[in-house]
Image: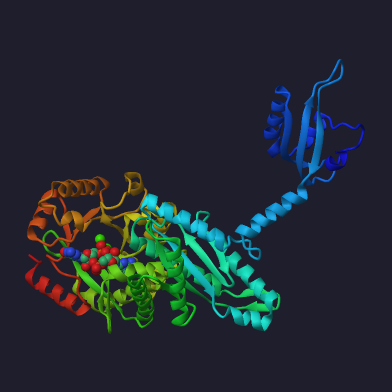
Amino acid sequence: MHKIYGVPKSSDELTYSTWSNTVHPEDFDQTSRHLEQAITQQSGYKDEFRIVCPNTGNIKYILADATYKKGYGDESDRMIGVNIDITDLKQAEQKIERLAYFDSLTGLPNRFTINDRLGQTIAFCNRNATYSALIFIDIDDFKKVNDSAGHIVGDELLTQFSRRLQAKIRAADTIGRFGGDEFIVILNNLGSDRGAAQVLVERFAFKMQALTRRPFALSHGSFLVSASFGITLIEGRSTVDDVLRQADMAMYKAKGIGRNRVHFFDPLMQKEFQERIDLERALGLAISNEEIEPYFQLQVNQDGTIRGAEVLARWHHPDKGYIPPAKFINIAEEVGLIDRLGRLILKKACTDFKRHIEKQVPDDFVLSINVSAAQILQPDFVRSVMDVLEQGDLNPEKIRIEITETVLLNSSEIVSLRLLELKGKGFKFSLDDFGTGYSSLTMLKNLPIDELKIDQSFVRDVSTNPNSAAITRSIIALSQSMNINVIAEGVEEERHRETLVGMGCHAFQGYLFSKPLPLVDFLSKIESIKSEGGTK
Ligand code: C2E
Ligand code: CA
Ligand code: CA
């Protein structure tokens, strides 16, 4: 008994205090309870618990089997029986369990566990009407690694590969080794919108792909690999076999079309995905080749005189035709092209303004430029904008930066510092799409905003919908109380303009006055307005 517990052998008996000091703290409550029960019921006691040996700190598993014996006279009560050290047995049991559920090389869930988790995922999708995704990942040419560098290096690669993937997944998701060089990832709970779920998986797959392409430091040197990704969405009515087969098929397609690829099982998803990849590539090229142009949309005062213009990006693709900003701006934001795109548009707009527009318009004419959150948050945003303006010899006072309310919500402190810095240089600011976001009055008070731009969704039915009219009226009142400008965009009809004038709005932009126009047309538009003495 003392040998097991590793305590000095001062008597044959293990005293309660020695025992209780040695039992593992996590097991103490339970086993004490069992012991007390045995004592009060004067019955047998059989239990399994862990002890921490006082001198070594080792943990041992103990099986105790004893009966209660009441002491006679001044004899104390005792438990008489045996303590068996079952540590080896327990460890073997745990090992078997690990082998059954986890892969021995990488420690990741194995095929058995993956099947089990997939079942749980499907049940979850079913209960919550949400999508999840299964990604099948296969290292390209893994066999070559094994054959040329040997199995030990191959194992090293598999281990490092799995660690990299593992580091990037959320606790709620699963990564497992399916066998050989095949891994799977289950992305859980991607929401109830199929399109949105698809976008999330795409992004994830790209992140994984980038991650696997970085060199691996193996014992025989640095090593580069790629992997093929097959993706399928999981929904409530999927079965484990189906989704595994689908992701596997998609992965083989990815290999078939040239490895190092991502492929979706669903043909429609694959088509959309391919279109998007093509568009990303084309966008990068179009920016490099400076094929995206600024168009100018007139802004006018109440009397029809020229006030300024909003610069809107236009992309005419040689094969695909006109691609609207709604389609490419968010791609540019997501893939990190928005900075280059923004600089290109600004540069071209500056040149157009300096060369052609400036001499045709009043001195207080201002160019409104759209700037995305991703741009403003760039650490060198101010420098980069200033560079473009300096090269174009344009004064920042000629520029009004349009930001949306969502920019302010993201990280308002950085944004407000940045705006103040730009303000110091002379830039003006307009809050675009105003009324659709959630900016608070406190937020507005602390920012150097010069103008609110009433969103076109309110302007469209300002004359007919009492809600839109009420919102518009309060935006105008807000601008008056803050003593800043207000402009309505999307003004398409004369009655919109009249209603807005009646409410106290004196600046307008919309098809009623002019569509966004390429430079040449914009210049003739200005000409005709000047010759008529206003648009009206
Ligand atoms: P936005 O800033 O709200 O721009 C106004 C949009 O309304 C423009 O669409 C414009 O063509 C359209 N519009 C103007 N007047 C009317 C009208 O009377 N009726 C109707 N129905 N629409 C009108 P566009 O050019 O398609 O731009 C869409 C969005 O793309 C813009 O919304 C802006 O958020 C973004 N965007 C455009 N160019 C750039 C750019 O250079 N940089 C950045 N970051 N975003 C840009
Ligand atoms: Ca705008
Ligand atoms: Ca807008």
Horizontal relation, residue 419 to residue 510: left or right: right
Q: Quadrant of the C terminus?
A: bottom left
Where, by quadrant of the figure, is residue 15 drawn?
top right
Residue 426 appearing in the image: no
Residue 65 lies, in percent from the top left, at: 77, 36
Q: Position of residue 177 (x, y in %)?
A: 57, 66
Ligand 2, seen in the image, is in the quarter at bottom left
- Residue farthest toward the top in the current orientation of the protein: 73
**Residue at 51% across / 57% down in the picture?**
116
Q: How is the image coloured?
A: rainbow
Choose between 2 and 192: the one closer to the eye: 2
Residue 237's image quarter? bottom left
510 left or right of 437 in image: left
Q: Nearer the viewer, residue 51 or 507?
A: 51
Q: How many marks?
A: 0
Tell me which residue sits at (53%, 73%) in the image.
138
Q: Is residue 326 left or right of residue 343?
A: left
- Foreground: 142 or 288? 142
The image quadrant that residue 96 belongs to is bottom right
Q: Position of residue 303 (x, y in %)?
A: 11, 60
Is 234 above or below relative to 91? below
Q: Is residue 39 above or below residue 398?
A: above
Locate the N terminus by quadrant.
top right
x 12%, y 65%: residue = 512
10 is higher (above) or lower (below) than 191: above
Task: Work out whether residue 154 or residue 241 is closer to the camera in this orientation and state it.
Answer: 241
- Relative image position of residue 123 (x, y in whole percent): 43, 53
Residue 493 visible in the snapshot: yes
